[in-house]
Amino acid sequence: MTKIAIIYHSGYGHTAVVAEHVAKGVTEAGGEAALLKIDSAAQDFSAILDEATTADAIIFGAPTYMGDISAPLKAFFEASSKVWFTLGWKDKVAGGFTNSLSFAGDKGNSLNSILTLAMQQGMIWVGTGLAPGAHSNSDAAPDVVNRLGYYVGVATQSDNAAPDITPPPGDREFARLYGVRITEMTKKMKG
């Protein structure tokens, strides 16, 4: 079975909702989803690094704080230098997602931070494969998939409310579809 590691940090629970929907897509596409939550920048990442190394693909996710990925995911990236020395993730499929309160909030920078790590690790990046669902600001309704118009990875928006109601349905569906896409592309790469 195709194993997809979903490594993420979630400060308030909203990014965890996105990760869970990515995992749902992985499972629906016939893959095995390993949800690996990063709790703090000070934790020992050995178990997560080991689990990720056994996966066929890795999808990274974090909230966007102050225009970039959160510190716990950044600390994990720095700890992954142990894997980099052995080229342990070379040729694995990679992808990324982020979430924040604002519609923009420099989420593109967060996705580019994740993309850069994947490229340094020699991974094969898979974008969303979806056109923007909204063609104007008035079309960016909460039930529209890819309403924020991102291609490189999944970007979602959450209101200042509980994670059981936000991010909205269209963003959750965007994450699910990305899980399906990553799984399908990983299966093709495995042959």
Image (cartoon, rainbow, N blue to C red):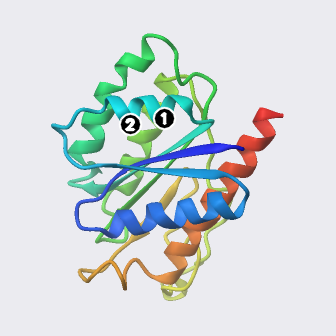
Where, quadrant-wise, is the C terminus in this rendering?
top right
The answer to the question of whether label 2 and label 1 lie on touching residues, with beta carbons closer than 8 A, is: yes
Amino acid carrying label 1: it is Ala
Residue 160 versus residue 176: which sits nearer the camera?
A: 176
Quick check: 140 left or right of 65?
right
User: Marks 2 and 1, how far apart in space?
Assistant: 6 Å
Residue 46 horizontal/vertical position (percent): 33, 28
Residue 75 versus residue 107: which sits nearer the camera?
A: 75
User: Which residue is painted at 30% across and 42% down in the image?
Assistant: 73
- State the residue lying farthest toward the left: 42
Quick check: 166 left or right of 90?
left
* Label 1 Cα crowd, 10 Å radius (few <14 / some 14-19 / many 20+): many
User: Which residue is painted at 57% across and 69% down in the image?
Assistant: 174
- State the residue lying farthest toward the right: 191
Amino acid carrying label 2: it is Ile
Residue 49 horizontal/vertical position (percent): 40, 30
Residue 173 position by quadrant: bottom right
Q: Is mark 1 on a helix, strand or loop?
A: helix
- When the figure is inspected, residue 64 is found, relative to residue 175, above or below; the finding is above
Residue 91 position by quadrant: top right
Q: What element carries label 2?
A: helix
- When the figure is inspected, residue 100 is found, relative to residue 49, above or below; the finding is below
Residue 19 horizontal/vertical position (percent): 45, 60
User: Which residue is painted at 51% across and 73% down in the image?
Assistant: 172
Where, quadrant-wise, is the N terminus in this rendering?
top right
Residue 28 horizontal/vertical position (percent): 69, 64
In the rendered image, which residue does mark 1 sit on? 52
Residue 189 versus residue 141: which sits nearer the camera?
A: 189
* Label 2 Cα crowd, 10 Å radius (few <14 / some 14-19 / many 20+): some
In the rendered image, which residue does mark 2 sit on? 48
